[in-house]
């Protein structure tokens, strides 16, 4: 769907079966994920946690997680568990003695303790109290030591105090989806906690010794405040807590302002693939995960949920056409407001034809008709080859749990038709993840080179550090193509998405408004609005994807009025936080004029 706000699109005919296929497939992926995770949470994770071996292992601390600046994001806090062996507390008098002493020392109700010991008389183990404070636990430990020395038969015979770590997230809900959480059985669940569970969990052995490593000196001093920790196995993230705080703040304000159901904002360094932050709304506090009744809320939609991207996908179509020489920025097409592709009539969103327009104008005005014409001219084999090269049919392999891959029909699929070529060209009729779209845009910003996104900067094991090296996946377009598309995307912000601009900075970007497929066709007055862009355009330091789900149609259905201004506000704050001066200060007036002249030349003449 294009991003022109002049007129609401007409309802689509319900007979197109691929929409139903797409909806069912997307819902199926999500439903399967939620059911499996819920089953694991409720059943498997609760088995055999109270065996002595499991209890002993659970007292070992889990590795800490810090951000790139050394801010503590996850660590263990220690409490005490009071346990007993009822088989050695045989008589009622002994049970009363133990219960009375525990009430005096740590406040456990004597009647309840005595009843627990009686009911578990045939067992070797019972847990009398969980998460006793350090002060109370130390008091009980001191008494037990003295009791063992002074009495032939200790007053608290059969009672023990065991340290019990509990995962703690000092930033509360900040980066909740990214981090995930640790269940009471010590299993990491969702996000980083699950993906790196084998490494962080002290009960397991993660073999990193076959890979080259370095020393702690490579880590900034602020990071070494908490790393290495007592566990000896820790993670340093690429995430910047300042960036994370900015995007969570702006996302919440955007959802409230446009009365959306939710949304996501992502920030990436395009040259490395390092993720600086991922925000989702609604989020959750991993400290309080056990109180959450809606388990689907734990799923990170940026990696685990599919959506139709709409017109932001046009940058992929333009990239493919530019790279194969099918178009130049100045190539002219005739837009009559409608075109037939296969058996499908394709309209611009406002049902208006714009006459003779260049490819650059078509991108800036987000014209479906011209984009579909370009795709047909390019041909299905070429178009879908580039869709694959940009990574939309495979996992990005980001190091976060539960990533899913996009769903794209292509020639050879029995459900594919030529009509799909037309609609797919402007982001309709295919389903992708936000991380796939962000990464594809980053490839354009990175001179045509696709990187593997990643969230962990370094793994620390004692004094040794394994630093994640940026990984090149493949070149997807030529550097010259990326330069031309960059110039077109800057023009798109200047002439078509002014609300996404930030004074003093050249920004490249594209908006997209996508209808939401339902069982009988697309839902009326329900959209997902997106904006994706990078800056500064001449030397991109960050790529940002803004996505809002179902904004209130009484405010606006269109990304130009919703997602675009949110992008601008995020970018404005990122420039300040990351210390990126305005273009004229950073480059100087003369160099800036040269860069702008080269951009205009690319738009007018292409690459020579």
Image (cartoon, rainbow, N blue to C red):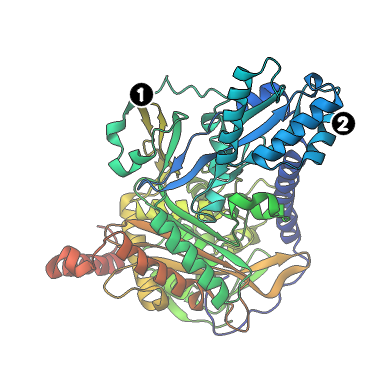
x and y, in percent, of residue 605 in the image:
27, 66
- For marks 1 and 2, the one nearer the N-term is 2
Name the foreground residue: 468 vs 373: 468
Q: Quadrant of the C terminus?
A: bottom left
Q: Nearer the viewer, mark 1 or mark 2?
A: 2
Q: Is residue 346 above or below residue 418?
A: below
Mark 1 is surrounded, within 10 Å at the Cα level, by few (under 14), some (14 to 19) or many (20 or more) other residues, namely few
Q: Is residue 180 left or right of residue 566?
A: right
Do we see residue 324 in this rendering?
Answer: no
x and y, in percent, of residue 146 in the image:
59, 24
- In this view, which residue lies farthest toward the left? 590
Per the rendering, the mark at residue 255 is none
Name the foreground residue: 256 vs 430: 256
Quadrant in the rendering for residue 518: bottom right
Name the foreground residue: 136 vs 440: 136
Element type at mark 1: loop
Q: Is residue 345 left or right of residue 276?
A: right
Name the residue at 30% across, 59% down: 578
Q: In this figure, which residue is indicated by the disc labeled 1?
A: 212
Quadrant in the rendering for residue 125: top right
x and y, in percent, of residue 286 in the image:
59, 50
Q: Is residue 387 above or below residue 223?
A: below
Q: Is residue 430 left or right of residue 606?
A: right
Quadrant in the rendering for residue 52: top right
Name the foreground residue: 100 vs 67: 100
x and y, in percent, of residue 592 in the image:
18, 67
Q: In this figure, which residue is indicated by the disc labeled 2?
A: 119
Report how many numbered discs are placed on residues in the image: 2
Name the residue at 86% across, 22% down: 122
């Amino acid at each position: 769907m294009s991003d022109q706000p002049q007129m609401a699109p007409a309802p689509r005919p319900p007979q197109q079966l691929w929409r139903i296929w797409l909806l069912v497939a997307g819902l199926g992926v999500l439903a399967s994920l939620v059911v499996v995770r819920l089953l694991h949470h409720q059943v498997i994770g609760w088995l055999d946690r109270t065996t002595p071996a499991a209890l002993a292992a659970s007292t070992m601390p889990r590795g800490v997680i810090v951000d790139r600046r050394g801010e503590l994001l996850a660590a263990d806090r220690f409490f005490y568990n009071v346990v007993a062996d009822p088989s050695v507390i045989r008589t009622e008098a002994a049970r009363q003695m133990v219960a009375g002493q525990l009430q005096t020392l740590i406040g456990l109700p004597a009647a309840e303790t005595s009843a627990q010991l009686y009911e578990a008389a045939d067992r070797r183990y019972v847990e009398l109290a969980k998460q006793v404070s350090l002060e109370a636990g130390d008091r009980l430990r001191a008494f037990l030591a003295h009791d063992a020395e002074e009495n032939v038969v200790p007053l608290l015979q059969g009672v023990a105090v065991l340290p019990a770590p509990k995962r703690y997230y000092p930033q509360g809900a900040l980066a909740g989806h990214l981090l995930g959480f640790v269940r009471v059985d010590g299993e990491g669940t969702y996000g980083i906690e699950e993906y790196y569970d084998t490494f962080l969990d002290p009960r397991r052995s993660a073999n990193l010794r076959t890979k080259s490593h370095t020393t702690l000196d490579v880590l900034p001093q602020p990071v070494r405040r908490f790393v290495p920790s007592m566990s000896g196995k820790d993670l340093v993230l690429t995430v910047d807590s300042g960036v994370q705080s900015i995007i969570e703040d702006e996302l919440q304000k955007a959802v409230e302002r446009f009365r959306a159901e939710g949304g996501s904002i992502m920030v990436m360094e395009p040259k490395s693939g390092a993720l600086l932050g991922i925000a989702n709304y609604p989020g959750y506090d991993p400290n309080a995960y056990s109180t959450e009744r809606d388990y689907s809320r734990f799923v990170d939609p940026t990696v685990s949920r599919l959506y139709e991207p709409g017109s932001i996908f046009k940058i992929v179509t333009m990239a493919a056409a530019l790279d194969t020489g099918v178009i130049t920025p100045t190539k002219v097409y005739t837009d009559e407001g409608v075109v037939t592709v296969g058996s499908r009539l394709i309209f611009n969103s406002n049902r208006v034809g714009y006459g003779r327009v260049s490819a650059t104008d078509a991108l800036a005005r987000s014209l479906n008709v011209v984009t579909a014409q370009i795709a047909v001219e390019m041909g299905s084999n070429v178009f879908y080859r580039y869709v694959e090269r940009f990574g939309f049919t495979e996992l990005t392999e980001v190091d976060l749990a539960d990533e899913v891959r996009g769903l794209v029909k292509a020639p050879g699929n029995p459900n594919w038709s030529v009509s799909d070529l037309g609609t797919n060209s402007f982001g309709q009729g295919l389903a992708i993840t936000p991380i796939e779209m962000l990464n594809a845009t980053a490839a354009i910003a990175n001179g045509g080179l696709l990187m593997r996104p990643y969230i962990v900067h370094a793994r620390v094991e004692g004094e040794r550090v394994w630093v994640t090296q940026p990984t090149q996946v493949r070149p997807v377009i030529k550097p010259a193509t990326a330069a031309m598309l960059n110039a077109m995307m800057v023009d798109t912000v200047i002439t078509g998405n002014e609300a996404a601009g930030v004074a003093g900075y050249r920004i490249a970007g594209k908006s997209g408004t996508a209808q939401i497929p339902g069982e009988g066709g697309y839902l009326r007055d329900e959209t997902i609005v997106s904006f994706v862009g990078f800056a500064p355009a001449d030397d991109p330091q960050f790529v940002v994807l803004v996505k809002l789900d179902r904004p209130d149609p009484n405010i606006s259905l269109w990304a130009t009025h919703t997602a675009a201004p949110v992008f601008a506000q995020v970018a404005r704050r990122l420039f300040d936080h990351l210390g990126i001066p305005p273009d004229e200060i950073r480059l100087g007036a003369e160099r800036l004029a040269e860069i702008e002249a080269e951009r205009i030349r690319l738009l007018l003449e292409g690459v020579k």
